[in-house]
Structure formats: structure tokens, C-alpha cells
């Protein structure tokens, strides 16, 4: 079906297919595989996912072309990368995660498309966050973020992220109504959100797993910034100074009060302890360097043997096998997903706040993963959105991406003119 | 709409910051990649050569590939990739040896190499000249800064591996030329330089003190001379040649200069006084100690003993050698020593070339020339085969149970501008002179 703007999902599908075919060609030519059927199966599955999703979108008529083409391209690339680490094959596990992520994008899209729906079920979202927090306290092991069910592990804190992003965009209208408490003007909803942020920070502190803390803090920071300046267009100088001073004080306090294991990471010299705590990062940097611009070839790396090669240090695993150029291009594609939010600007404050929160979550997570594994900042051990292996991360990122997509194809409500009861008809 | 635009601006800011981070990462990766690869198990490291093309390091060498003990004279200076020695030329410059480029990756049999200023044959001779004694010897060209000899005993031959590493003799895994030691009477050079700057040459030369074998200082503690019947009344050059402790104790007590003067001029010479931070410098990445001491009262034994080169005073042989260079060239500025002459990359292109550099002003030009004359006068008492400025020293160590022999000096010849420092542990002045003589003749070949 051809849309009015001349684009159709079938026509743009070829851009995605072209990108994947190029990578698959590299797999065939440079990859390490036992049998030609290995890359063939991979090719069939990647192209099937492309075509399948575009057929699905064709019937959904969502008109978010740029976002969709980028999303499917990123997920296809992710599937190719994950299937080739160590040896070319087909990672059915990651294939399922990709499908789940696509489903989550649709779920996130449906949840956030209509802001009235979000307002209506706001308490449920808070309830989900509360339930997830409780599950961490009650179901995980002692002071841990992981729930283990046999060989299967779930990270509930990952699922908190999308709902955390969502609740920061709720109750926008309440921001117009300030209440005076002890002579200070306050908005109750903002204080609830600050309390929620504090709860999550304390939870992570207690679990001694501060890896995702910067992601939550950046979402909360951006969300609050959007909220405190609504509906005014400008921030007052006083407010900007206040925010900067407050932020600096919090950062200084966190730096000072950080527990020992965090302090040791903040001041770590990985090369001085390259066979101890710096092992992963040193190996990641060595592998990236060995890969150079163009990589050793799919399946020809050795970093895949290092723990978390397909999650926390995946940027280096990709750099080693595919080259730094390919790794950077993959990251830039994810970044372009965020860029679509400023190209197709949301038309409501709810969706704008939602897009800002979602962008903050994805960008912070990318920065933590890439810069952390390459020793530019302390290593926190978080996943690279859509690329890293792991169901929890894929589900969370899928929902967050769905929120971004929703901002680009939201439901409009045209205000209905009120009837004039005296004249019994429409006003003239 | 303006409030909606704010959202876009915020996202743009985040994207911009992230892209800046990526650019920094990219730059870091490209610049540091050779260093990362040098730590790789797949790394192919190039050779280290001496000034005549002899191999001093071969990362792929196995026992039997080279004659026995081939690397032993400079083993703990050049080092290897085992991680057993961390302050060596190889461990500090591995990225320069990487046969690697970001574009081409790891290249087997590339041409990355370090060409040193060392003379392997001379080092072997000097190493042998120690006989069974431990210690170190370092010598360099004080016009250019090229280190020609740098041996330290005991040593290891890295090619033989580190079997029984636990039982290696103390000091085997470090080059003593860069570690502080008790300087003994060689410290009198520094004390004389400080006095010359504080009092002026004429005043200093007018000083004469009596030595009757023992001197009771202002706090009633005895300073004993190595010559029990004493040296009698001496001038500065005579006392310098006699290495007379009572004379120097009285010089320290002299009212024509203050404890502040000593501290000031010592600090200027990179001697860290009274727990002040030590000056740090490196020789192509190899960290070298400088010097330190404790002095607080001119009349106290500890201060006088420190200025004589005992007590808390410690100086690295490399630092002694640098003082000699600053005296020999008459400028008061030391020529900075270096080991790497040039470096070639994987494709054989020269990517680094050494050049002569000098330190900051360690002491005044006039003092350098004054002390130079005194040292040359003292050098006449030695028959090393060259016109030399010399100061010997005997340092009591292990609570006086052993004495180390030291010799530091320079050759006064424009065509053979060599400064050196020799330490023979538990040795005699004869042994230190023999090592110095061997060193000079070996370099001169």
C-alpha cells in the first residue's frame, strides 16, 4: 500500500535488506565457518526477520518509516554479530530475543501512543515498579540484582527502566497546579518521582550493583528538568544555577561516599592489575586494537572466550572481528534511532518528555557500555542496547524504543466544540 | 512550541556529548593501540639493538639461540616481556616494539625496533671487570646524553627464564644505576658545590681547617677521619683529595653559610631535603631515583654526617653521573641521559629520534667551573689513562658491617666527553678504579 508521502514499508525494506546483505557477504567471504550451510541459515533467518517485520508493519500502518527501518537494521546487524562470535553459526537464542524486542517495541508503542491511556493507568505503572522492587528484595539472592531460575536468570532492574521512563512523563497537567507547603511551592507528583528515584538509588546501593545507576539518574534528571520548566519556555538563571549546584553537590557526595569497590573502580589502573580486576577491560582493549579498522573477520576473534564478551564488552568483541569502523557504524545506527526523535518532533509535552527520558536511557546505557569497556570511564558492566545478548535488556530496550516510536506517531485528539445549550446547536 | 523545542535541544545535547565521547575514544584507540597490542599474546615484538647492531632483546629467542650469557650484562636494564621486571627499557617501551599498525593489524616479522645508544661489547667488559662483586656502573656522553654503559650486578639472563626466581640474589631484577644508594664521600662534590654558591669561590678557598684524626663538633660528638693520625691543616682542594671528614664537618659548621643555604642549594641539585618530594625523572620511561637527605642543624652530627655522604643521604649513581656532566660541561646544567637513539615502526620508517637535552640549572656556571678545577686536580692522583676529574667515596652500609666503594667523575676531553659513576658493593677503591678504567678503555675502543 503506497502512502501519501510516497513511501511504503515495502520500498524502504530494501535499504535494510541491502545493509544486511552487505554484512552477510562479508560473513561468506571473510568468516570462519565449518559448512556453507551455517552462513546460509543465518542469512535466511536475518532476511526473514526483515521481511516478516515489514509485512507486519504494512498492515499496522504506523507511518514511522525512519524509526522502523533503523530498528530492524540494528536488530538484524545484532543477530549477525551475535551469531558470528568465535565461529559463524546461527544464534537462535538471540533471534528469539530480537523477535521479543520487536514485540516489545509494538507494546511500548501501543502503551504510549495515547497519553490519556497512560494517565489512566498511571497507578498500574507505579505498581509494576513497586512489584519489581519487591521482587529484587524478596526473590533475588542475598543483596543481588538477579533472579535465578535454574540456568535461566532475569534482571528485574532492567524491567524497571522503561516504566521509570514512562512515569516521569505522566501527570504533566498537575505541573500547572503548585501547592504551598511551609511557604514553599511544590508539585506533589514531582516529589513522588524524586522519592521513587531515591528508592531505586538506595536499592542499587544496597544490592552493591551500581552499574545501572547512571541510567536511572540521567532519566530522572532529564525528566525532572522537563517537568520543572513546564509550561514556561525558558529556565530562569536562578533555576539553572540551582540545578548545577545541586547536581555538583550530589555528584561530589556520591564520589565521596561511594563504597570501596566503587572507589577502586573509579581510580583503577587496569594495566597495573591486568591479570586481576582489569582483566576484562585489558583484553577488550587488546582485542579492539588487534581488530584495527577492518577486523580479523567474523568468527576469527578470540575475545569471545572472555566473560561478558557478548554483553558488557561487546563493543570490543565487534571491533575485533568486524573492525572499529563496523562497531562505530552499528553504534551510530542506534544513535540515529534517537535522532529520529528530533527529526519527527513529538507534538505534545507528554511525548516530548517521554522521548527525552527514553533518549537519556539509551544514550547513557550506550556510553556506559562503550566508554566503560574501553576504559574511558569506570567500567560498570551494562549492556549495549539492542546489540548485547540478554532477554532482560532486549525487553527493556524494546519498550523504551516503543515509547520513542510513539512520540513520532501519536494519537491526536481534536477538541470537539461545545454545544450551546441555550441555542440548541453549534455556536456560529 | 518553545517548550517542545526544549526537548529536542536536550536530546541534541545528549547526542552531541555522546559523539564527543566517541571522538575521544577513537583518538585514544588509534594513539594507544600499539600499547594495547604489545600486551597481546599474539603480539610480535621487534628487536632491541645496541649502537653497533648487536641484538639486546629478542622476544622470540629460546635458550640456545644466543651464546650463554649474551644478554646478561644488560639483562635487568633491557628486560623482557615476562613481567618479572617492570622498570626496564622493554617493559616501558613495549608499544614501540609492536609490529603492528591500526590499518594492517599485527604483522609477523615487521621492522619495529629500538636502536639503543648502548655499546654491548663495552658493557660485557665492564660486567666482567666487577669480578665476583656486585654493584653497578653507568657512563654517558655528556655532550649528547647517550648512555653507553649501564650494567648492574647481580643480573639475570632473561633468555634462561626465571627458574628458581625466589632464590635469585637480592637486586637481580633491578638496575641499581637508577636506585638510590649511600654515596659516601662522593657527596662531598654536592656539598662543595653548595658551599661555593653560598660563600663564593674566594671565601671558600680561603678556608682551612685542622684534622687530628678526630673532630669534636659543636654538639660534642666526634667526627672520625679515616686517617687516624689526621691530615693536619688543609685547604679545600687538599681536604677534597684526602676526603677528610673532620674538614667537611667544620666546613658545614662554618658561620659564612647557613643551614638554609645548604637546603636551598641541595634542593636545586634535585636532592630532596627533609622528606620533601623527590624530583622525578625518567630515562626513556625507566624511572630513576634522584637524591635525598635530612639536614636541620649545622651543628648536629646527623647534618654534618649527611653532608659527608652518610646517615640519611642517598643518591642514585645516575644522579651522580648527571652532576658530573654539569660540572664537566661547565654550565651547571646536566645533560639528560637517554638510551633510545631511534625507533623504527613496523614498516621500518624511523618514527622517533633522540636529541640532546639539558636539565634546569642545578648549580651556577661559575661553581661548576670552580669544582671542575678541584676535581681535575684530584684526578691527577688517579691513573685511569685519561685526564679526569674524580671523586671517590667509601660508604658504610649494613650498619657499618660493609663498605661500598664509589667513584664518580668525568673525562676532560672534547673528543671523549664521558661522565660516569661506579659502585662496587663491599669493595675497595682499587676495585672501583679498576672498573672505571675498564669502562673508559672499553668505550674508547
Image (cartoon, helix red, strand yellow):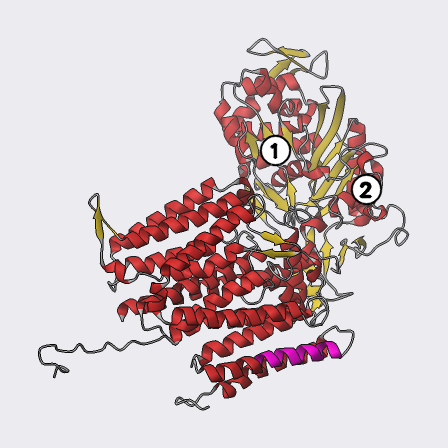
Query: Is A217 placed left or right of B179 in the picture?
Result: left
Mark 2 chain? B
Which residue: 50% across, 30% down? B264
Regarding mark 2 in the picture, which secondary structure is present there?
loop
Residue B103 visible: no
Regarding mark 1 in the picture, which secondary structure is present there?
strand
Q: Which residues are magenta?
A: A37-50
Q: Is residue B90 above or below residue B193?
A: below
- Residue B303 position, x and y percent, is 57, 20
Place residue B325 in its image quadrant: top right
Q: Nearer the viewer, residue B5 or B367?
A: B5
Whether label 2 touches label 1, CB < 8 Å: no
Which residue: 38% across, 72% down? A113
Q: Is residue A255 above or below residue A114?
A: above
Whether residue B188 appears in magenta in the rendering, the answer is: no
Q: Is residue B112 above or below residue B241?
A: below
Q: Nearer the viewer, residue B384 or B135?
A: B135
- Residue A420 position, x and y percent, is 12, 78
Q: Nearer the viewer, residue B380 or A236?
A: A236
**Extreme-left residue of the structure:** A422
Query: In which quadrant of the rendered image does the C terminus of chain A lie?
Result: bottom left
Q: Circle 2 is placed at which residue position? A: B156
Main secondary structure found in the magenta portion:
helix
- Residue B232 position, x and y percent, is 66, 14
Residue A56 visible: yes
Say few, some or many: other residues with alpha carbon within 10 Å of mark 1 (under 14 / 14 to 19 / 20 or more): many
Mark 1 chain? B
Which of the labelled discs sits on residue B291, or is there none? 1
Label 2, label 1: how far apart the Cα atoms are: 26 Å
Which residue: 58% across, 83% down? A18
Amino acid at each position: 500500500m503506497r502512502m501519501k508521502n510516497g513511501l511504503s514499508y515495502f520500498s524502504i525494506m530494501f535499504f535494510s535488506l541491502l545493509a544486511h546483505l552487505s554484512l552477510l557477504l562479508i560473513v561468506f567471504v571473510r568468516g570462519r565457518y565449518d559448512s556453507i550451510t551455517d552462513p546460509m541459515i543465518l542469512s535466511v533467518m536475518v532476511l526473514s526477520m526483515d521481511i516478516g517485520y515489514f509485512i507486519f508493519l504494512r498492515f499496522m500502518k504506523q507511518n514511522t518509516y525512519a524509526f522502523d527501518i533503523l530498528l530492524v537494521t540494528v536488530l538484524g546487524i545484532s543477530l549477525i554479530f551475535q551469531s558470528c562470535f568465535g565461529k559463524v553459526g546461527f544464534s537462535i537464542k538471540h533471534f528469539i530475543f530480537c523477535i521479543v524486542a520487536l514485540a516489545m517495541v509494538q507494546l511500548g508503542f501501543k502503551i504510549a501512543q495515547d497519553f490519556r491511556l497512560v494517565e489512566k493507568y498511571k497507578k498500574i505503572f507505579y505498581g509494576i515498579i513497586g512489584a519489581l522492587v519487591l521482587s529484587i528484595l524478596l526473590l533475588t539472592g542475598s543483596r543481588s540484582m538477579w533472579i535465578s531460575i535454574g540456568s535461566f536468570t532475569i534482571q528485574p532492574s532492567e524491567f524497571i527502566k522503561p516504566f521509570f521512563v514512562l512515569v516521569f512523563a505522566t501527570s504533566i497537567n498537575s505541573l500547572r497546579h503548585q501547592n504551598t507547603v511551609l511557604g514553599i511551592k511544590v508539585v506533589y507528583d514531582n516529589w513522588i518521582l524524586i522519592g521513587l528515584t531515591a528508592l531505586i538509588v538506595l536499592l542499587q546501593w544496597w544490592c552493591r550493583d551500581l552499574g545501572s545507576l547512571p541510567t536511572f539518574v540521567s532519566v530522572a534528571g532529564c525528566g525532572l528538568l522537563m517537568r520543572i520548566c513546564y509550561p514556561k519556555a525558558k529556565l530562569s538563571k536562578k533555576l539553572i544555577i540551582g540545578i548545577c549546584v545541586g547536581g555538583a553537590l550530589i555528584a561530589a557526595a556520591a564520589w565521596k561516599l561511594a563504597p570501596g569497590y566503587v572507589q577502586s573502580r573509579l581510580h583503577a589502573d587496569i594495566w597495573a592489575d591486568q591479570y586481576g580486576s582489569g582483566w576484562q577491560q585489558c583484553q577488550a582493549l587488546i582485542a579492539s586494537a588487534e581488530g584495527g579498522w577492518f577486523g580479523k573477520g567474523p568468527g576469527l576473534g578470540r575475545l569471545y572466550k572472555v566473560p561478558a564478551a557478548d554483553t558488557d564488552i561487546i563493543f570490543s568483541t565487534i571491533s575485533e572481528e568486524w573492525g572499529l569502523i563496523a562497531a562505530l557504524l552499528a553504534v551510530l545506527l542506534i544513535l540515529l534511532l534517537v535522532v529520529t526523535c528530533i527529526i519527527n518532533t513529538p507534538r505534545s509535552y507528554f511525548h516530548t518528555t517521554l522521548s527525552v527520558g527514553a533518549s537519556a536511557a539509551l544514550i547513557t546505557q550506550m556510553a556506559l557500555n562503550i566508554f566503560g569497556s574501553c576504559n574511558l570511564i569506570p567500567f560498570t558492566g551494562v549492556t549495549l542496547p539492542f546489540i548485547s545478548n540478554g532477554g532482560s535488556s532486549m525487553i527493556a530496550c524494546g519498550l523504551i524504543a516503543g515509547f520513542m516510536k510513539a512520540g513520532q506517531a501519536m494519537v491526536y485528539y481534536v477538541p470537539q466544540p461545545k454545544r450551546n445549550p441555550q441555542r440548541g446547536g453549534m455556536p456560529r | 512550541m518553545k517548550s517542545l523545542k526544549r526537548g529536542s535541544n536536550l536530546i541534541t545535547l545528549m547526542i552531541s556529548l555522546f559523539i564527543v565521547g566517541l571522538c575521544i575514544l577513537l583518538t585514544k584507540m588509534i594513539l594507544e593501540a600499539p600499547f594495547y597490542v604489545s600486551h597481546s599474546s599474539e603480539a610480535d615484538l621487534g628487536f632491541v639493538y645496541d649502537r653497533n647492531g648487536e641484538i639486546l632483546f629478542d622476544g622470540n629467542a629460546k635458550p640456545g639461540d644466543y651464546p650463554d650469557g649474551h644478554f646478561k650484562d644488560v639483562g635487568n636494564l633491557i628486560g623482557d616481556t615476562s613481567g618479572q621486571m617492570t622498570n626496564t627499557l622493554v617493559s616501558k617501551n613495549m608499544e614501540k616494539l609492536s609490529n603492528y599498525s591500526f590499518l594492517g593489524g599485527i604483522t609477523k616479522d615487521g621492522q619495529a625496533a629500538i636502536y639503543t645508544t648502548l655499546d654491548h661489547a663495552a658493557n660485557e667488559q665492564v660486567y666482567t671487570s666487577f669480578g665476583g662483586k656486585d654493584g653497578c656502573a653507568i657512563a654517558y656522553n655528556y655532550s649528547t646524553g647517550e648512555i653507553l654503559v649501564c650494567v648492574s650486578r647481580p643480573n639475570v639472563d632473561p633468555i634462561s627464564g626465571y627458574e628458581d626466581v625466589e632464590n635469585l640474589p637480592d637486586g637481580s631484577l633491578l638496575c641499581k644505576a637508577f636506585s638510590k644508594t649511600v654515596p659516601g664521600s662522593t657527596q662531598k662534590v654536592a656539598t662543595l658545590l653548595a658551599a661555593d654558591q653560598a660563600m663564593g669561590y674566594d671565601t671558600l678557598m680561603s678556608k682551612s681547617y685542622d684534622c687530628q684524626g678526630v673532630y669534636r663538633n659543636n654538639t660534642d660528638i666526634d667526627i672520625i677521619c679515616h686517617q687516624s693520625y689526621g691530615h693536619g691543616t688543609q685547604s679545600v682542594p687538599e681536604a677534597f683529595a684526602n676526603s677528610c671528614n673532620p674538614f667537611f664537618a667544620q666546613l658545614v659548621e662554618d658561620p659564612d653559610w647557613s643551614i638554609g643555604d645548604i637546603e636551598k642549594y641541595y634542593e636545586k641539585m634535585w636532592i630532596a631535603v627533609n622528606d620533601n618530594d623527590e624530583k622525578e625523572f625518567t630515562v626513556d620511561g625507566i624511572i630513576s631515583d634522584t637524591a635525598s637527605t635530612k639536614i636541620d642543624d649545622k651543628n648536629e652530627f646527623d647534618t654534618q654526617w649527611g653532608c659527608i655522604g652518610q646517615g640519611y643521604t642517598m643518591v642514585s649513581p645516575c644522579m651522580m653521573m648527571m652532576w658530573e656532566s654539569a660540572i664537566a660541561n661547565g654550565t651547571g646544567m646536566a645533560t639528560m641521559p637517554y638510551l633510545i637513539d631511534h625507533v623504527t615502526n613496523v614498516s621500518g620508517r624511523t618514527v622517533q629520534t633522540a636529541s640532546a637535552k639539558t636539565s634546569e640549572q642545578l648549580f651556577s656556571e661559575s661553581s661548576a667551573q670552580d669544582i671542575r678545577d678541584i676535581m681535575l686536580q684530584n684526578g691527577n692522583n688517579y691513573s685511569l689513562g685519561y685526564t679526569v676529574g674524580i671523586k671517590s667515596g667509601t660508604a658504610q652500609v649494613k650498619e657499618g658491617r660493609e663498605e661500598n666503594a664509589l667513584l664518580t667523575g668525568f673525562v676532560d676531553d672534547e673528543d671523549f666527553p664521558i661522565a660516569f659513576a661506579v659502585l662496587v658493593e663491599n669493595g675497595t677503591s682499587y676495585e672501583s678504579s679498576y672498573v672505571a678504567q675498564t669502562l673508559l678503555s672499553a668505550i674508547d675502543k
